[in-house]
Image (spheres, coloured by chain):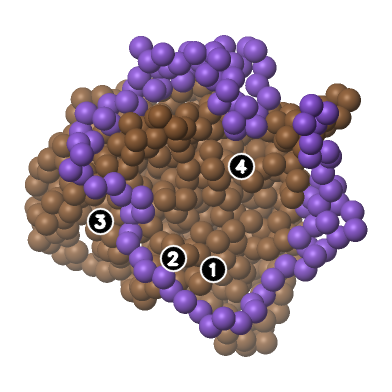
Chain colours: A brown, B purple
Amino acid sequence: MTTANDLIHISAADLAERLSSGEVSSVEATRAHLDRIEAVDGDVHAYLHVAADAALERAAEVDRLRAEGDAGLGPLAGVPVAIKDVLCTIDMPSTAGSRILEGWVPPYDATVVRKLREAHLIPLGKTNMDEFAMGSSTEHSAYGPTRNPWDLDRIPGGSGGGSAAAVAAFEAPFALGSDTGGSIRQPAAVTASVGVKPTYGGVSRYGAIALASSLDQVGPVSRTVLDSALLHDVIGGHDPRDSTSIPDTWPSMAAAARAGRREGAMKGMRVGVVKQLNGEGFQAGVTQRFTEALALLEEAGAEIVEIDAPHFEYAIAAYYLILPAEASSNLAKFDSVRFGLRVNPPGGGTVEQVMSATREAGFGPEVKRRIILGTYALSAGYYDAYYGSAQKVRTLIQRDFDAAFGRVDVLVTPSAPTTAFRLGEKLDDPLAMYLNDLTTIPANLAGVPGIGLPIGLAPEDGLPVGIQFMAPARADARLYTVGAALEQILEDRWGGPLLSQAPELAVATAGGTN
Amino acid sequence: MSEITAEQVAHLAHLARIELSPEEIESLTKELGSIVDNVAKVTEVATPNVPATSHPIPLVNIFRPDVVGETLTQEQALRGAPEHAEGRFKVSAILGEEQ
């Protein structure tokens, strides 16, 4: 018999099987997750909005379709899912963590959301994030931070801390995220979850509230590699509504993940360790677990090669010019006219003054910082020196990747330089905050895919450490094979998933917390 | 140290249409200076012979038949607006007294 406790702890793949066999209903699975949210989200604050009634209605509809023997139900029909608040949803507020969009309900669904609905998944709600995805800790959300389920005094990463914390706290089997410089992979690292940034253009961004359009990519967040692959298969593919969407047909990511669990999957795989993203500047326990993971890969038959990527050290500098420049343009749409907040200055004013007062009141400090920086980088007299140079660095980083992928199948780095830091620790030091995305930014600049997954706990603080693999553009499937292979090796050694070692969260009841 | 001044930040804030407070201008002047100092390292390797990349995956245009697709209704388009009237977005005066 499957208990409600089982239903929140099993993988999405297992849950899908039990739904399809009729062992459990979607209403039961959905209710179990809603109850869990009710019990722990007061502390974790992974969600900005929970759509309990709509979720239960949809679940009942899927159960009815299944009872009628509907052959059109997808493999994940009836499985609940959480959605990052950067994605437009026609039936739920979509704020991107900003005060300026408080309560805004979009007139259309993002393509990825539409695909979830068409595959009969059950949206549970919208997850918290740094305002407009600017941050590495979720502390820049206008609605208060999300807390790390491993230690409620610590950050869950960002910008997608809500989605990562939701899956790590068993408040959803999987979730959608977005990754502009690491916002899926870095939260995965600090919460012991899995996250994938697909190839740029591999997943539609229509209806994703844009941060930096040449970098943004939507992707899956989950507890297992296979679950991310299953979700990727639902959301991926060409979208005529996104002009940057790649018209390729894609192989099954789920099949690639399953191939990784077969004997000998890593045999002969050439794995490149990026010299510039290892050792110095990394927490000791991160380096230790990373080195151990490399040894396990080698034991499994992989060939470990050191790779020199001399321009990666310029990635953060280039990123913090390109991103603010694009963000300052993208966020110009928040003008107090067509949607969102309007603040009238005392005594009224011109539309320009209303706009300025609205943006002053509606944007938080990090958003203002990046808009001003981007405006500076794009202004006459500085454009060539800053934005122009950053675009050239982008070419150099792409060339480093090209040279590396001439020698190896995948590149590997730690997913983040440290384990989860304490809330507030880096909030007043933007430069220290920016360094958290040291290892994840190069993939965004080059458009290549990356996967993050847990590799153990750092001995000094007992907190999760993540590893990142990167593959050539369009070779996303290879990441699922490698990720699933390492996941299986590690889980065999641990005797189960790393998340089963996370501390139990206090559970709120009607009478308070016990 | 880069020479970012408070006047410059105030000017940028005007260009970006954000009514910053004097305290925000002061703290942003400092922060911007140190951020710009750090990101300026891109100029070390961006030599004239390196081409710029604006888009990570090169694509050519993909065309669809030139027929009307699904569009928002006027009601849907106006639904999220702070103020609207007679089927249009409503704003305050475009020109100030001095204009």
Judged from this view, the residue extending furthest toward the front is B99
Left or right of A439 on screen, residue B77: right
Quadrant position of residue A236: bottom left
Of the image marks 2 and 3, the number of the one nearer the N terminus? 2
Of the image marks 2 and 4, the number of the one nearer the N terminus? 2
Quadrant position of residue A472: bottom left
**Viewer-nearest residue: A67 or A472:** A472
Q: Which residue is mark 1?
A: A241
Tell me if label 3 and label 4 are in contact, CB under 8 Å.
no
**Viewer-nearest residue: A32 or A402:** A402
Q: CA distance from mark 2 to mark 1?
A: 8 Å
Circle 2 — which element?
A: loop
Residue B33's spot in the image, x, y percent?
43, 17
Residue at the image point whose x is 83% and y is 38% from the top = B93
Q: Residue A471 bears which disc, if any?
A: 3
Q: CA distance from mark 1 to mark 3?
A: 26 Å
Q: CA distance from mark 2 to mark 4?
A: 23 Å
Residue at the image point whose x is 53% and y is 77% from the top = A74
Q: Amino acid at mark 2?
A: Ser
Residue at the image point whose x is 59% and y is 20% from the top = B10
Quadrant position of residue A143: top right
Q: CA distance from mark 1 to mark 4?
A: 21 Å
Of the image marks 1 and 3, the number of the one nearer the N terminus? 1
Circle 1 — which element?
A: loop
Chain ID, mark 2: A
Tell me if label 2 and label 1 are in contact, CB under 8 Å.
yes
Q: CA distance from mark 2 to mark 3?
A: 19 Å
Q: Which mark is nearer the camera, 1 or 3?
A: 1
Relative to A47, does residue A76 appear above or below in the rendering? below
Residue A413's spot in the image, x, y percent?
24, 41
Q: Residue A332 bears which disc, if any?
A: 4
